[in-house]
Amino acid sequence: MRDNLYSRRPLARWYWAGAIASLLFMALGCVTYLMHVTADPASLPLDQRAAFDAEPVWLTAAYAIAVWIGLAGALMLLLRRKLAQPLMLISLAAVVVWLAGLLLVPNLRETISSNDLAVAIAVAAITWTIFWFARHSAKRGWLR
């Protein structure tokens, strides 16, 4: 029974919707990253400025890796390439580092709201789902 679970199957009708949604989500992440790194800290409200100032460079780097590698992985899903799976794994790992940084850097943890944390957890969950989708697609033989 387990052998048939991931046997090669015809491309599911919902595949394209998942690939396009993945690409849109990762593109949105890239836009928010660009907005973040080009923001003028002086124009931010005090609470957001404190969070901006508390963010270490490695956390911004993890954010960049997560969104740009994720965008490349989502594009590979759209092109039905096996490279999607390892790219989405790298993106997921970077999201985990980013989320851990939000929780573990004391100055940053004290400045982010519970809504910010909820959004970060949702982003991690969606990124995991896209990685699962890439992995599932590779196992089904939908990626070449």
Image: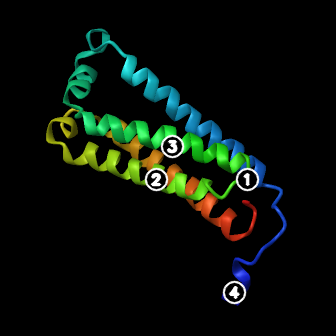
Residue 31 pos. (x, y %): 51, 26
Return the residue found at the far left.
106
The answer to whether mark 4 and mark 3 are in CB contact below 8 A is no
Return the residue found at the far top.
43
Q: Which residue is mark 4?
A: 3
The local crowd at label 3, few if under 14, some if 14 to 19, many if 20 or more residues have their Cα within 10 Å, is many
Q: Which residue is mark 3?
A: 69
Q: With respect to residue 14, does 98 lie above or below?
A: above
The answer to whether mark 4 and mark 2 are in CB contact below 8 A is no
Q: Residue at x 25, y 47 (%)?
A: 103
The answer to whether mark 3 and mark 1 are in CB contact below 8 A is no
Q: Earlier in the sequence, mark 2 or mark 3?
A: 3
Q: Which residue is mark 2?
A: 90
Label 3 is placed on what type of residue? Ile
Label 4 is placed on what type of residue? Asp
Per the model, the C-alpha gap separating discs 1 and 4 is: 23 Å
* The C terminus lies in quadrant: bottom right
Identify the disc placed on residue 80. Answer: 1
* In this picture, residue 42 sits left or right of residue 95: left
Tell me the mark number nearer the camera, choosing from 1 and 4: 1
Q: Earlier in the sequence, mark 2 or mark 1?
A: 1
Label 1 is placed on what type of residue? Arg
How many marks the image carries: the answer is 4
Tell me the mark number nearer the camera, choosing from 4 and 2: 2
Label 2 is placed on what type of residue? Ile
Identify the disc placed on residue 24. Answer: none
Q: Residue at x 69, y 54 (%)?
A: 81
